[in-house]
């Protein structure tokens, strides 16, 4: 693939020394993306997709893996287990049409939460967004998702209550 942003592929070490690779997702990652989503706990899937699902529908899987690396960027964290690449986390942004901001989402496999992978993914996503000359990153977090709210606070996001009094909190970070 000619437009694959190879410059965004980076090896990292987690707190425990585990080597992970952070890289943009590719269309051929559909199987590991589906395995990743299937492996999430019900709570993690609900917090990410704000609804109940067990796996990604074919169109949603295509949307999440066949990206343009410009308006839609997704970085995955992978490790090698039993000789094959396994996805353990994903962070993405989608540019808000007609603006210099983007909406982000991040999910980390339950077994890998607290290892540092989420922070690495977000720092890499911030850098990709800055290279794209985006000025702000926004997200919508369920008010009940206390771990994500704490994580966003640690990353310097500002919090804004949903004006409709709903169950989400709008988080914003200037890039």
Image: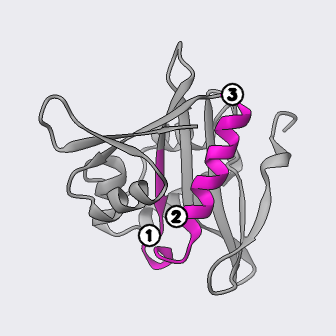
- Judge depth for marks 1 and 3 and give the one in front: 3
Query: What residue does disc 3 label?
Result: 133
Residue at screen point 34% across, 48% down:
49
Of the image marks 3 and 2, the number of the one nearer the N terminus? 2
Residue position marked by numbered label 1 in the rendering: 39
- At x 66% / y 67%, what residue is drawn? 78
Query: Does residue 108 appear to the left or right of 169 in the view shown?
Result: right
- The span shown in magenta is 105-133
Query: Relative to the observer, which residue lies in front, 80 or 161?
Result: 161
Q: How many marks?
A: 3
- Does residue 54 show up? no
Q: Quadrant of residue 130?
A: top right
Contact check, label 1 and label 2, Cβ < 8 Å: yes
Q: Provide residue 109's location: percent of width, then percent of height.
A: 47, 69
Residue 35 - label:
2
Task: Say which residue appears at 56% left-offset and 56% top-offset.
Answer: 90
Taking depth in this image into account, of 139 and 6 the one nearest to the observer is 139
Up/down of 47 relative to 173, above or below: below
**Prevailing secondary structure of the magenta residues:** helix
């Amino acid at each position: 693939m000619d437009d694959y942003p190879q410059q965004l592929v980076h090896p990292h070490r987690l707190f425990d020394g585990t080597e992970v690779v952070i890289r943009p997702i590719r269309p051929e990652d559909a199987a590991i993306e589906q395995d990743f989503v299937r492996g999430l706990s019900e709570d993690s899937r609900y917090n990410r997709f704000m609804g109940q699902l067990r796996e990604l529908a074919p169109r949603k899987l295509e949307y999440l893996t066949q990206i343009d690396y410009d308006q839609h960027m997704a970085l995955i964290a992978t490790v090698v287990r039993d000789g094959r690449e396994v996805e353990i986390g994903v962070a993405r942004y989608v540019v808000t049409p007609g603006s210099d901001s983007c909406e982000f989402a991040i999910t980390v496999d339950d077994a890998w939460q607290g290892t540092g992978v989420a922070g690495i993914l977000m720092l890499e996503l911030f850098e990709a967004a800055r290279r794209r000359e985006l000025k702000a990153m926004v997200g919508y977090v369920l008010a009940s998702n206390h771990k994500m709210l704490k994580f966003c606070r640690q990353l310097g996001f500002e919090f804004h209550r949903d004006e409709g009094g709903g169950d989400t909190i709008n988080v914003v970070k200037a890039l």
